[in-house]
Image: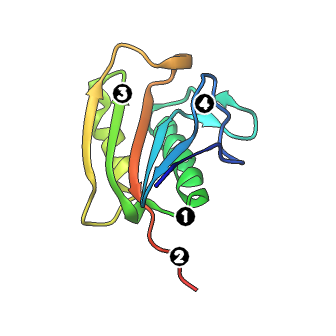
Amino acid sequence: MGIDKRMVAGAPQPIAPFSHACRVGDLVFITGQMPTVPETNEMLLGTFTEQTHRVMQNLAIVLEAVGSGFEHVVQSRVFITNMGHFDEVNGVYASYFEAPLPTRTCIGVTGLAGGADVEVDMVAWIPPATG
């Protein structure tokens, strides 16, 4: 079993040396996504709500490209620069999932790259292809 490292067309391009996703077996490890607008590769520095939606939309792009989706996420880590916005970020994050929810860690940090306030990474299962 090898490691499939890949960049994803349509996802924001990284500003550092990393792949969007690395697949090992039937699991994919997705790099932390920032609130970067894919079309411009510029950081969306809006509210915590706006940034969280953009982050989750970026994750959706990568999940789809690797043959998975939010229903197959098994673990995620959320990084936020202000724990006072914990409930706001949770509301947006939760809107992308149905129960049962994946495991999750939320970490308060002093800063994120590019001035972002929210970053999320994930591990997801890739179901066998049908057809």
Q: Is mark 1 on a helix, strand or loop?
A: loop
Measure how far apart labels 4 and 2 are at the Cα level: 35 Å
Amino acid beneath label 3: Ile
At 52% from the left edge and 32% from the top edge, which residue is drawn? Answer: 34
Q: What residue does disc 4 label?
A: 44
Amino acid beneath label 1: Gly
At 42% from the left edge and 38% from the top edge, which residue is drawn? Answer: 120
Judged by depth in the image, the label closer to the viewer, 1 or 2, is: 2
Residue 80's disc is 3
Number of disc labels: 4
Percent x, y for residue 100? 24, 65
Q: What residue does disc 2 label?
A: 129
At 33% from the left edge and 44% from the top edge, which residue is drawn? Answer: 76
Amino acid beneath label 4: Leu
Q: Residues within 10 Å of mark 2 (few under 14, many from 20)?
A: few
- The reply to whether discs 3 and 4 touch (Cβ–Cβ < 8 Å) is no
Measure how far apart labels 2 and 3 are at the Cα level: 35 Å
Percent x, y for residue 73? 37, 57
> Looking at the rendering, which quadrant does residue 35 occupy?
top right
Amino acid beneath label 2: Ala
Q: Is residue 88 left or right of residue 22?
A: left
Q: Earlier in the sequence, mark 4 or mark 2?
A: 4
Q: Earlier in the sequence, mark 1 or mark 2?
A: 1
Q: Residues within 10 Å of mark 4 (few under 14, many from 20)?
A: some
